[in-house]
Amino acid sequence: MPSTAPTPALPTPLSAPAPAPAPAFVSRPALALGPHTVTAERIREDILDRNPDYPARQAQTVRLALGNLPGTRRYFRPYELVSSPGRTAAERKATTFGDLLAAAEHAAAEAMLTAGVRPDQVDCVIVSSATGDAVPGLDVHLQQNLGLRPDISRLPMSQLACAGGAHVLLTARRFLAWNPAAVVLVVAAESLSSLYQNTRTSVEDQIYKGLWGDAAAAAVVTAEQRTPGLRLEHCFEYTIPHTTDRYRKLTDHRGDHFASTRASLRSVTDLGPALLDWLDRHGGRELDFGVLHPGGPAILDRLGVLLDADAAFLRHSRDVLTEEGNLGGATVFSVLARTHRTPPPAGARGLLLGLGPGVTLSTLLATWTG
């Protein structure tokens, strides 16, 4: 008599396609820019006044380098305080964390309001800040001050720096793949002016003083679309081997400061093959818009050459660098906010990219949804 036992199910072949992940939509971002505006020209002249012993050639090099950084910068504190040699490391740290928390609260509250999300509906908060390092961190303070539930997931990230904005979105995309019903709040907050150090006088140090700005930014990421904006598609991370010295945060008796080597200018070239190969595997190199944070004008120019991008593709990134400065991880959100003001057509294909210490790349392909 034939067996009536059910036939066991065959195992799924490893080559079978994985189920499509839940979509991830980024609601319109909110920003809290530093309220104090200072011109790049004032920073340049102040740096030269503070260093009267520069050899003529070095003074000219600094003048020319800072002259290539026009426009204005946004600080949480007045320039006189930022550049004061009398601030102790403890004063810097306390002031910085307080400024970042207030700005991050403001941006997060506005982002939730824009997305139509109540604080008790948030399931996960992802926070990036390399200058707001404290224990407990910004994530815990935001959870309590904003009235988020005590059982939410918290993902604090304190070492991403300029790649932080892209990376929190990349992480939100992956979180939603496993938790498609979740509401994710992402925050990037940096006070890069807090890294100002009068004792650091190399050309690279002076360029960073003329480039930095302060801001906090936030957005809501969900599997259902709540506002026009980005639908996140593919994501990619890459770290250039043996490049931990190119961008670093160092600490001395005066507090934290930033350092880099001239090899940092090669980072886009070094990342190029991996980035272009990834684009080729996910629809090709034809892109309609960019939400880019490569760090500074020189790196932005090199990225434009790599991507064969025109001025319109780089426009918002260049405008943020000129009018607000390098805002760290918050930069991509400021670029995205400008993209919302003059949006591409629905269905346009874009690239969101952050470049940070490591040297690390965090990037996503996205579609604009109307």
Image (cartoon, rainbow, N blue to C red):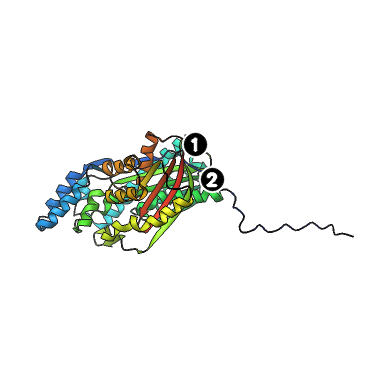
Which of 156/312 is in front? 312
Q: Say which residue appears at 77% left-offset and 57% top-offset.
A: 7
Quarter of the image for the N terminus: give it.
Answer: bottom right
The relative height of residue 305 versus residue 2 in the rendered view (above or below) is above
**28 left or right of 262 in image:** right
Which of 100/276 is in front? 276
Residue carrying label 2: 182
**Measured from the top left, where is residue 326 in percent x and y?**
30, 48
Amino acid type assigned to the residue bearing label 2 in the image: Ala
**Measured from the top left, where is residue 210 in percent x and y?**
22, 49
Residue carrying label 1: 226
Residue 330 in sight from this viewpoint: no
Q: Residues within 10 Å of mark 1 (few under 14, many from 20)?
A: some
Disc 1 versus disc 2: nearer the observer: 1
Which of 109/209 is in front? 209
Q: Earlier in the sequence, mark 1 or mark 2?
A: 2
Q: Residues within 10 Å of mark 2 (few under 14, many from 20)?
A: some
Disc 2, SS: loop
Measured Cα–Cα span from mark 1 to mark 2: 13 Å
